[in-house]
Image: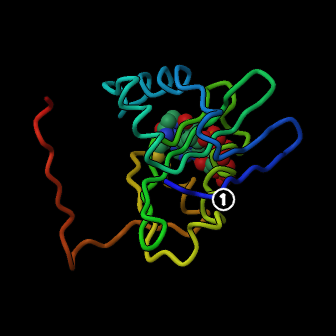
Amino acid sequence: VKDRLVELRRGELLLSTDRTRVDVDRVLAWLHASHWGGSVTRELLVRSIQNSLVVGVYGPAGQLGFLRVVTDMATFAYFTDVIVAESARGQGIASWMVEAVLAHPDLQGLRRFALLTRDAQTLYEKFGFSATDLSASTYMELRPPRR
Ligand SMILES: CC(C)(COP(=O)(O)OP(=O)(O)OC[C@H]1O[C@@H](n2cnc3c(N)ncnc32)[C@H](O)[C@@H]1OP(=O)(O)O)[C@@H](O)C(=O)NCCC(=O)NCCS
């Protein structure tokens, strides 16, 4: 994905979309402890980072937050793997990452931002996300068997 680099600072914290800054092993450990990312391999994570727009938040002791956006940068963007180090939660890091994505110069004028969440609705509602009424259409998916 050829997205423009975004870097923002808040005190000691840096928010960056630079893929080379991502601490892959740290993010992998967070995903393995999450309720959805238990089976992600390092290779899969690296490939997904290369082919997504990614946001990281970094402090003096390393990475504190990660968010990945799957997007065509024209019509659609899907938020996934939104995660903040346990010790850094409740300080607005996830909110900052969501805000940075919505303000990203390559994600303006899109038709739709989508995501699935089990219990973090309030994080997204603040930015205008709302639960979708699917009565007029059906969300469908195919889950190919793992190879
Ligand atoms: C969800 C998560 C990313 C939030 O990160 P964070 O940096 O602590 O979030 P913020 O400090 O920006 O808080 C944003 C809002 O989300 C809400 N929120 C945070 N974590 C929440 C949770 N687990 N459940 C419900 N609401 C939550 C807070 O109430 C907060 O609202 P406020 O601004 O009105 O106080 C973090 O708790 C996390 O990594 N959880 C484990 C992974 C996960 O479940 N990810 C969600 C993927 S959709």
Q: Is residue 61 above or below residue 46?
A: above
- Tell me how many marks there are: 1
Q: What residue is at 47 percent from the left and 40 percent from the top?
A: 49
Task: Judge from the rendering whether residue 86 lies leftward or rightward of residue 74; answer left or right.
Answer: right
The percent position of residue 16, horizontal first and vertical second, equals: 69, 44
* Ligand 1, image quadrant it occupies: top right
Say which residue label 1 marks.
99
Label 1 CA crowd tier, 10 Å (few <14, some 14–19, many 20+): some
Instruction: Judge by depth and name the residue closer to the eye, 43 or 129.
Output: 43
The amino acid type of the residue labelled 1 equals Glu
Question: Residue pushed farthest right?
Answer: 11
| Label 1 element class | helix
Q: Is mark 1 within 8 Å of ligand 1?
A: no
Q: Is residue 16 above or below residue 122?
A: above
The percent position of residue 35, horizontal first and vertical second, equals: 38, 31
Instruction: Judge by depth and name the residue closer to the eye, 16 or 37.
Output: 16
Instruction: Judge by depth and name the residue closer to the eye, 147 or 34.
Output: 147
Q: What residue is at 83 percent from the left and 46 percent from the top?
A: 9
Instruction: Judge by depth and name the residue closer to the eye, 91 or 5.
Output: 5
Q: What residue is at 50 percent from the left and 46 percent from the top?
A: 68
Quarter occupied by residue 41: top left
Q: Is residue 68 above or below residue 85?
A: below
Question: Residue pushed farthest left?
Answer: 145
The percent position of residue 130, horizontal first and vertical second, equals: 46, 68
The percent position of residue 137, horizontal first and vertical second, equals: 20, 75
